[in-house]
Amino acid sequence: MKFENKSFKNETIDIDFNSFINCQFENCTLVFRGFGPFGMDGCSFTNVNWSMAAAAANTLNFMAGIYHGAGEGGKNLIETTFINIRKGKGNY
């Protein structure tokens, strides 16, 4: 669903499969479950909490396990992933 110029306040919002353009979020929890893409452009955030659930949380747990349990190679994989994220590269 596409939301444009909408204000969200004191809500929990699932962001999967949604697009937010010039929206304002105040005192909200934004939940990404990892089931589909989302978009945000020109949005503002005040006192917002981000939450990962379901598949997205599983991915974070996987990455933590690789980082802490797969030796130097695992640490290098995760560190390289974050370097690529900071550079805006899409090959993770």
Image: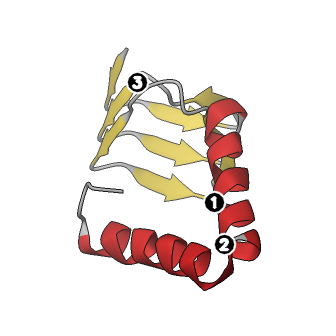
> How crowded is the residue under tag 3: few (<14 C-alpha within 10 Å), some, or many (20+)?
some
Q: Is residue 62 above or below residue 3?
A: below
Residue 61 seen anywhere in this rendered image of the structure: yes
Q: Position of residue 90 (x, y in %)?
A: 25, 55
Residue displayed at 74% across by 62% down = 65
Residue 91 image position (x, y, % from top left): 27, 56
Q: Is residue 19 left or right of residue 8?
A: left
Picture quarter containing residue 30?
A: top right
79 and 37: which one is in front? 79
Q: Earlier in the sequence, mark 1 or mark 3?
A: 3
Q: Quadrant of the N terminus?
A: top left
Amino acid type shown at disc 1: Met
Label 3 SS: loop
Q: Tell me the element at label 2.
A: helix
**How far apart, in angstroms, are the residues tagged by discs 2 and 1?**
6 Å
Instruction: Kindly identify which residue carries mark 2.
Output: 67
Which of the two discs, 2 and 3, sits closer to the camera?
A: 2
Location of mark 1 (residue): 63
Residue at screen point 59% across, 48% down: 26
* Mark 1 closeness class: few <14, some 14–19, many ≥20 residues within 10 Å: some
Q: Earlier in the sequence, mark 2 or mark 3?
A: 3
